[in-house]
Amino acid sequence: DAGVIQSPRHEVTEMGQEVTLRCKPISGHNSLFWYRQTMMRGLELLIYFNNNVPIDDSGMPEDRFSAKMPNASFSTLKIQPSEPRDSAVYFCASSLRSGGASDTQYFGPGTRLTVL
Amino acid sequence: AQSVTQLDSQVPVFEEAPVELRCNYSSSVSVYLFWYVQYPNQGLQLLLKYLSGSTLVKSINGFEAEFNKSQTSFHLRKPSVHISDTAEYFCAVSDLPQGGSEKLVFGKGTKLTVNP
């Protein structure tokens, strides 16, 4: 299996621009998670989906952030407009939900976002 | 909501020395507990997890962790480390009792550096 695939791996953009991060979960997995990792705040869950439906988006920082999962094999995280404080590594993870948090989450390699 | 404290942000050790990475969580109710490892420029990988049963859980590469309910701790240990164990280690706990949500709460991580 190819694992969780994220693109791009690196993104450098200017403040005010729109940024779209992409994720392809492991085939057959039905839960998908978006995390943000910074030195100051560590690893934070932004949002997670189950069967393409957003379940918990309480970690989404503000209205500039949005996430979609149009089908079981693709999700996007969009930031519009971007700000320098959004600079971080964004991880996508997926799991084969059998009920609750006992399932292993498989992480992608991350997208390193730099907003100038 | 749960919280996770990893008391040491950095732990330097020499090769073949023992190591303990400490993790405490906030709730005394039933939880699921995890250790994930992040090698440089990679996503997180599950190292081991405690769901129920024996309080001592082991990984395939020699790490072990012991669930201590009275002390709300889940410390990670290895009797003899290798250079290849150099990585960042994250402790995580399920957000709701008995894993009622898929959401995990992560600690801020401990950077383990193994020196020759």
Image: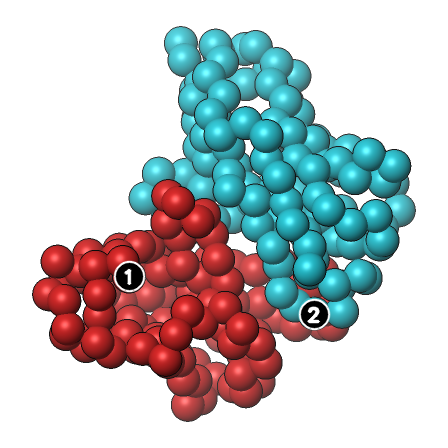
Chain colours: A red, B cyan
- Residue under circle 1? A86
Give the residue drawn at x 65%, y 68%.
B102
In the rendered view, tell whether residue A97 sits above or below residue B26.
below
Measuring from the top left, give residue B24's x and y in whole percent: 70, 38
Task: Name the quadrant containing residue B18.
Answer: top right
- Residue under circle 2? B101
In the rendered view, tell whether residue B110 sits above or below residue B2.
above
Which amino acid does the dot numbered 1 rest on? Answer: Asp
Measuring from the top left, give residue B113's x and y in whole percent: 43, 22
**Disc 1 to disc 2, C-alpha distance:** 27 Å
Give the residue drawn at x 33%, y 65%.
A6
Identify the element where label 1 is drawn.
helix
Measuring from the top left, give residue B25's x and y in whole percent: 71, 44
Using residue B74 as the reference point, say whether residue A93 is left or right of it.
left
Using residue A60 as the reference point, say whether residue B90 is left or right of it.
right
Give the residue drawn at x 69%, y 55%.
B2
Which amino acid does the dot numbered 2 rest on? Answer: Ser
Observer-nearest of B11 and A107: B11
In the rendered view, tell whether residue B13 sits above or below residue B40.
above
Give the residue drawn at x 35%, y 38%.
B40
**Which is in the foreground here, disc 1 or disc 2?**
1
Observer-nearest of A73 and A90: A90
Would residue B37 be seen by someone viewing this image from the given angle? no
